[in-house]
Image: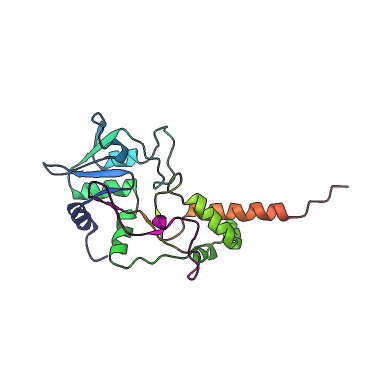
Amino acid sequence: MTRNLTTLLSEWVTQGFRSIGQILITPLAHGGYELRHHDDATVAELRPYDGVEAARRLSMYTDQGEFRPLKTAPNLARGWRLTLSHAGELRAALDHFYPAMLGIWASQQSQSLRPIPLRDTLGRQTGMYTASKRLQDDEAQSLVGRACSSEGACLKRVLWPLTAEQPMTSLPAEKCCAEPARLADGTRSIPLLCHEACNLLVAAAREVVKTRERAAAPPKAPSA
């Protein structure tokens, strides 16, 4: 990438990008930025935090104190506001909340992002995940429809097809669109983009295949 990502982020905020995922970004009058959960937009009493290290801690757990293995799941804890001093801290904090997402969005903006078909991703698997290569097309569509839904699974937009010729048809069109959302107040949201199936989906694909194959296997003969 030829341009500094911190500079790009500062420009995006100036251009009206004021949210990403479940986070609102507010430039402060005296300089710096405030982050908070978008469901806390109008909440007055929030726990105050400062600095990048606080972002790392806030990103790790749900409201129930459960660890968040998938940072783009829609289960970020509420009840906090985080103050950051400058654009460099803003970038570092957002990288804790949504790792690599700013860089992927920048690649999409520069037209250099190349989505990788699911079949290509599964075709590279080895060892215990080799079984995922045997995922059938209908199983893939059903699995992606469940595992990648915005409501309970992941906030990313799925840009990869099943193959170069076959799109994913089990997701709504808005879930497969790279364009930023324009919000009711006129601001825009930096989209979370998925250009390749994640390890969690690969593991789920393996389990779908193994479950089918176990069910189809002939019963073992009883011991003599």
Residue furthest bottom as drawn? 165
Foreground residue among 105 and 4: 105
Q: Is residue 19 above or below residue 77?
A: below
**Side of 88 where 194 appears, left or right:** right
| Residue visible at 27% across and 46% down in the picture | 93
* Badge count: 0
The N terminus lies in quadrant: bottom left
Q: Quadrant of residue 39?
A: top left
**x then y, percent, for residue 180:** 30, 56
Identify the residue at the far top of this view. 45
Q: Is 196 placed left or right of 189 in the picture?
A: right
Query: Which residue shows up at 41% across the image and 33% down it?
Result: 65
Q: Is residue 144 above or below residue 109?
A: above
Which residue corresponds to the image point at 58% horizontal and 60% vertical from the top-left? 138
Q: Could you tell me residue 206's position as x and y percent?
A: 58, 55
**Range of residues picked out in magenta:** 161-190
Farthest right residue? Answer: 224
Q: Looking at this view, name the residue that lies furthest to the front.
A: 184
Residue 97, image x, y percentages: 33, 45
User: Which of the pair 216/150 is nearer the observer?
Assistant: 150
Is residue 221 part of the magenta span, yes or no? no
User: Which colouring convention does the figure follow?
Assistant: rainbow
**Residue 169 within the magenta-colored segment of the rendering:** yes
Quarter of the image for residue 54 reads: top left
The kind of secondary structure the magenta stretch mainly shows is: loop
Q: Nearer the viewer, residue 196 or 26?
A: 26
- Is 214 left or right of 200, judged from the image as shown? right
Horizontal and vertical percent for residue 166? Answer: 50, 67
